[in-house]
Amino acid sequence: MKRWLMEILACPMCRHHPLELHVFVEKEEIEEAIIVCPKCLRWYPVIEAIPHMLPDELRNKKEDLEFLRKWKDKIPKVVLERGRPFNIKDLRER
Amino acid sequence: MSYASPREIRKVFNTIAKSFSRTRRRPWRYPLEIVNNHLEGPLADLGCGNGRHTLLMAMMGFECIGLDISPELLKMAKELVKAFNIHDVTDFVEADIRFLPFRDKAFRGIIFIATLHHISPRKLRIHCLKEVRRVLKPNSKAVVTTWTKLKPSAMLKCLLFKLKNPRAEFGDVLIPWKLKSQKVLRFYHLYTQRELEEDCFRAGLSILKSYRDYENHVVVVSRSS
């Protein structure tokens, strides 16, 4: 994923723009990151340099929770606690 | 109908990605319909599959964003543009065409090739075209193509499917993709030229050009004011 993509990305659920980007791994391009909608607090993972901007109904809870666990030290607190569609509460339930 | 759900379409294309991609090497020339030099911003390739058209547009010197619902096809698309060394001007997003993750009026042109026909029912197809309209800049163009039902074998398939599934729309079919170990069924809603024009019209798009090319119906559209 390239940084310039943020100029046009919007939240697929509430259509808010601009979104926030928190980068975890960057080489030639952004490899691992999280994209956050400041309006509805939905978050979208960037995995292997591809942003996954799926609507709630197509998300995979298991994979999403794995992503949250993997990066929990780097994900902003507000997203961990109140992020949608899944957050740290779902992680604790497991 | 579950065979036409986005989840199912995603599963189908992930399963057949490799062999599907081998049969999708040569690009169509439809992207040439929409390129322009009087606007700023990137182009979009909605339903980009293995990225053959994203590559073509990037080679013409435009920034281009490919979107697809299948992560397997997206990986191939990324490999393809890397192999041609035009990685810098392209990017790829995994998303659902019903919920485009782009801001309004983001693109100077959009190609939507052989993708709309995987969506069901009609109301949703029109919704997707409205999404295309939303992210298109004023004075820019989109090209939309779908497969035709106006050939004997396709018409027969449509009739048989409708007889078996009375609640389906006429034009709905399941087309098999043969893999070594299994047969995978892909959902299509096959079109007529008129029907494609009407769907675009209902989505608030104006039709600049409309023609049939082999087994494809093609329309070039813009935002009507």
Image (cartoon, rainbow, N blue to C red):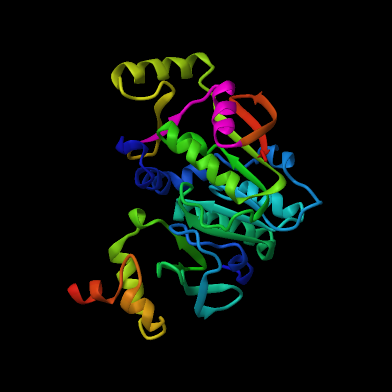
Q: Residue at the right extreme?
A: B38
Spot occupied by residue B171 in the image (x, y as percentages of width and height): 44, 23
Q: Residue at the left extreme?
A: A93
B141 to A33, vertically: above or below: above
Spot occupied by residue B193 in the image (x, y as percentages of width and height): 59, 23
- Residue A23 visible from this viewpoint: yes
- Residue A71 visible from this viewpoint: no
Q: Residue at the spot x=30%, y=70% of the render?
A: A65
Magenta residues (range): B183-204
Q: Quadrant of the N terminus of chain B?
A: top left
Q: Quadrant of the C terminus of chain B?
A: top right
Spot occupied by residue B43 in the image (x, y as percentages of width and height): 67, 52
Q: Indicate left or right for A86 with B175 as reference.
A: left
Residue B194 part of the magenta segment? yes
Residue B193 part of the magenta segment? yes
Q: Residue at the spot x=18%, y=73% of the render?
A: A93
Q: Residue at the bottom extreme?
A: A73
> Tag count in the figure?
0
Residue B185's quadrant in the figure? top left
B216 to B108, vertically: above or below: above
A75 to B43, vertically: above or below: below
Foreground residue, B44 or B187?
A: B44
